[in-house]
Image (cartoon, rainbow, N blue to C red):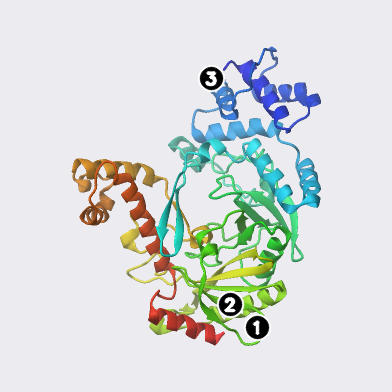
Amino acid sequence: MEINKAIKSLALYAENEGLTEKEDFYYIINQICQVLELDSFEDCYIEEVAPLEEILNAILDFAINKGICEDSVVYRDLFDTKIMGVITPRPSEVIKAFNAHYKNSPQEATDYYYNLSKKTDYIREYRIKNDVKWVTETEYGDIDITINLSKPEKDPKAIAAALKMKQSAYPKCQLCRENEGYAGRVNHPARQNHRIIPIELSGSDFFLQYSPYVYYNEHCIVLNKDHIPMVINKSAFDKLLAFVEKFPHYFVGSNADLPIVGGSILTHEHFQGGRYEFAMAKAPIETKLGFDGFDDVEAGIVKWPMSVIRIASEDKARLSELADRILNAWRGYTDEEAFIFAETDGEPHNTITPIARMRNGRYELDLVLRNNITTKECPLGFYHPHPEYHNIKKENIGLIEVMGLAVLPSRLKEEMSLLRDAILSGADIEQDERIAKHKAWADKIMAENDINAANCEDILKAEIGKVFTAILGQCGVFERNEKGKEQFIKFAKSV
């Protein structure tokens, strides 16, 4: 696509999608020309506006040929975000529109905001559609498996450039409000097309935004106005419940506040939510529990590989009060027989991953008991993927995965393709260093299945699902057997 056509197409795209007004047309044309270091524009006929990805690729190719953008995924992302920033409405306009929609309904407000995030390319739909997704049937329900490919990996050129860069503390992290409109750099994503919505949660100032990588439908992030550390306490429960009161069609949860069992960013208080029902939310209570003084709160152990207490009430204050009591009891709980230690050598191990939702007019909290103790055999964490499963996943099990959605490393797409070919051809898996780590796992799969070209891929996917379900079980602090159930109930009685 010729550059003048690309420029005009982007201006028309912005107008058609309601990002700009008709009166803004030549202003937008000139702003794009300025970014492209052009001092003139030749009008041209556009029969039909091309898809956004095609328009941006044409503009990026021109910028690379002109020498104002380097040809690598990181630099292309920095440059096309700069271009999209030109057609993205100002923060004040977005907030005003969101609040106007919210007066009609919370869902109308989030529909507007989510669609805006896609139209402005903050959520890159054309990348997300490349993610590999499937469902595995288990005794706990349908578990979602994803190999996420939408988050670009840094190329060697960008990594080298980042090493030479002077370290910057602005923004302090990728969640901070200062990211809104930020130009980015090779070690920090550009955010000129990023807009955030101020909300108040239990007396604290927060912002709502969407995740650009969308692990599930309307995957949102709720971040504290201030760069303060993650803490799970009564205040956190109050904030989660306040959020689902404001947005009853969304769930919201928090990663735990300790390393290994916590999220990737523990330095900035934030929650994750969205419009999606995970397998854990669908899982029933299998053992009812009662807590003294809380006869008005329904409680029980959830049928789930991890150790989850679900509590529900129409009164969010009562729910928060009980959650706080359970948390405080768990923080100090030790059961040596169950290999649960509240602390070792002064280091605390017990915490909770909480998830809030509205269901049938009641507030509901799922409290997932977590422990981050390490052992000689499991130096990355005992209640963590064990070494025999590191060929599939060895990264932390965070909030999203706790609820039943596996976020597996992008390397697995190529590795599973290579493994499939090796299995079908009878090649020696151990001789290919890219898949040698899968040898023992593959041998077991081949011994247990009659594999052919028609079913190999499906069998591998099903086996990955089984591994992820087993990993969730390893992350459960109480085992899924009668002894573990007794130990779980013993803890509940101690609350």
Q: Where residue 32 appears, x then y in whole percent? A: 68, 25
Whether residue 392 appears in this view of the structure is no
Judged left or right of residue 335, residue 181 is right
Q: Quadrant of the N terminus?
A: top right
Whether residue 306 appears in this view of the structure is yes
- Ranked by sequence position, the earlier of labels 1 and 2 is 1
Judged left or right of residue 383, residue 173 is right
SS for dot 2? strand
At horizontal 69% and vertical 59% (from top left) the residue drawn is 248
104 and 327: which one is in front? 104
Q: Where residue 128 appears, x then y in whole percent? A: 52, 41
Q: Which residue is mark 1?
A: 294
Instruction: Indicate the amino acid at tag 3.
Output: Asn
Judged left or right of residue 61, residue 16 is right
Q: CA distance from mark 3 to mark 1?
A: 68 Å
- Ranked by sequence position, the earlier of labels 3 and 2 is 3
At horizontal 42% and vertical 49% (from top left) the residue drawn is 409
CB contact under 8 Å: marks 1 and 2: yes
- Ranked by sequence position, the earlier of labels 3 and 1 is 3
Q: Which residue is mark 2?
A: 299
Q: How many numbered circles does the render carry? A: 3
Instruction: Indicate the amino acid at tag 1.
Output: Phe
At horizontal 58% and vertical 77% (from top left) the residue drawn is 299
472 and 36: which one is in front? 472
Q: Which mark is residue 65?
A: 3
